[in-house]
Amino acid sequence: MFIWDRITIDPKVFHGQLCIRGMRIPVPLIVKLVAVGKSPQRIAQGDR
């Protein structure tokens, strides 16, 4: 599965920002969290 299979754009969700499908987590937020050192596992658990 490619990462793009999990990313969606919906004008009704976060004003059309890229989001993780089914989770309503905006991709820019994930990028920021990774940039400050959060692990993907902690992000997936909701540790923001």
Image (cartoon, rainbow, N blue to C red):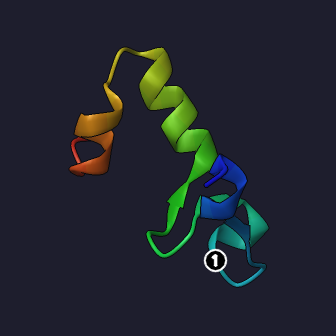
Q: Residue at x 32, y 24 (%)?
A: 38
The residue closer to the viewer here, 3 or 45, is 3
In the picture shown, does residue 47 fall above or below 10?
above
The residue closer to the viewer here, 19 or 12, is 19
Q: Residue at x 48, y 76 (%)?
A: 22
Instruction: Please state the horizontal and vertical placement of residue 43, each as a whole percent of the image.
Output: 31, 41
Instruction: Please state the horizontal and vertical placement of residue 39, each as a whole percent of the image.
Output: 31, 26
Tell me: 30 left or right of 42.
Answer: right
User: SS at mark 1?
Assistant: loop
Residue behind mark 1: 13
The residue closer to the viewer here, 3 or 47, is 3
In the picture shown, does residue 21 fall above or below 10?
above
Instruction: Please state the horizontal and vertical placement of residue 17, each as a whole percent of the image.
Output: 73, 60
Tell me: 4 left or right of 29.
Answer: right
Q: Amino acid at mark 1?
A: Val
Tell me: 28 left or right of 9.
Answer: left
Q: Residue at x 56, y 70 (%)?
A: 21
Crowding around mark 1 (Cα neighbors within 10 Å: few <14, some 14 to 19, many 20+) is some
Tell me: 24 left or right of 3.
Answer: left
Which image quadrant: the C terminus? top left
Which image quadrant: the N terminus? bottom right
The quarter of the picture where residue 19 lies is: bottom right
**Which residue is farthest bottom?**
12
Instruction: Please state the horizontal and vertical placement of residue 45, each as a whole percent of the image.
Output: 21, 50
